[in-house]
Amino acid sequence: MAVFSRAFHGRREQDPALPPGQYLTEDFPVLSAGPTPPVSADDWSFTVTAESGERHAWTWAELMALPAEEPTVDIHCVTRWSKLGTTWRGVSLDVLLEDVDTAADYVLAHSHGGYTTNLPLEDVLDGKAWLAFEFEGEPLEPVHGGPVRLLVPHLYFWKSAKWISGLQLMLDDQPGFWEELGYHNYGDPWREQRYDGD
């Protein structure tokens, strides 16, 4: 029986666009912490609550009236799949937060259905995050977070909260749903920050 060493076969070169430990997929896997909540655009609203308690709110119509962008980005799931060159349409959080007076360093994203995830405020500003309502030219499907999800592509995708309903601005950090259950507090795919302690 022939025995081949790894060196004999040669090592497959890792795609430089893939963070370590990730594999490329052409599919769009559906992974959620719970069932898909029934959220229609007619009923949708988004609220930013500052640490002072001041609230800023947008309806679907008001969101659609804001300037939208079409970012093309790579996305990386903590379950190890990556999807490259995805195109979305949405409103930058820079637009939504520009008139919010805050000294906060953190945000807690809230979703319909009760899901939460935390992020440093600086990770959702300066063109790093959007409220996305289209994927590849089509309305975002409910199973992928439609009508609107948070899109923070430089972090693992659990930080891109589906069915987003609001952001809570905070002076101190507060872990969200998966972070409370042992996932990494930050979630940088290039540093393989999957779980607490990584």
Image (spheres, grey):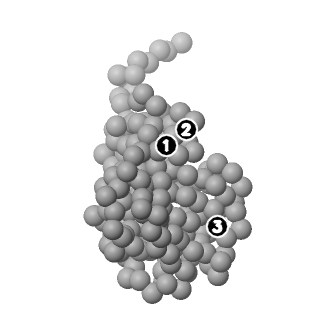
Looking at the rendering, which quadrant does residue 187 occupy?
Answer: top left
Question: Residue 117: image x %, image y %?
Answer: 51, 50
Comes first in the chain, label 1 or label 2: 1
N-terminal of the two: label 1 or label 3? 3
Q: Residue at x 55, y 80 (%)?
A: 59
Element marked by disc 2: helix
Q: Nearer the viewer, residue 51 or 109?
A: 51
Q: Position of residue 45 (x, y in %)?
A: 57, 74
Q: Which residue is mark 2?
A: 180
Q: Select label 3 or label 2 by which is in front.
A: 2
Q: Amino acid at mark 1?
A: Pro
User: On residue 175, which mark appears?
Assistant: 1
Dot 3 or dot 2, earlier in sequence: 3
Within-10-Å neighbours for mark 2: few <14, some 14–19, many 20+: few
Using the image, tell me which numbered label, if any, was put on residue 100.
none
Query: Measured along the vertical axis of the image, is residue 91 above or below residue 184?
Result: below
Mark 3, Cα crowd under 10 Å, few <14 / some 14-19 / many 20+, is: some
Judging depth in this view, the residue of 151 and 103 nearest the camera is 103
- Near mark 1 (Cα within 10 A), the count class, few <14, some 14-19 or many ≥20, is some
What residue is pinned by disc 3? 142
The residue sitting at 42% across, 59% down in the picture is: 51
Classify mark 3: helix, strand or loop.
helix
Seen in the picture, residue 151 relative to 186 is either above or below; the reply is: below
Residue type highlighted by circle 2: Glu
Q: Secondary structure at mark 1?
A: loop
In space, the residues marked 3 and 2 are separated at their CA atoms by 25 Å
Q: Of tags 1 and 3, which is closer to the observer? A: 1
Quadrant in the picture for the N terminus: top right
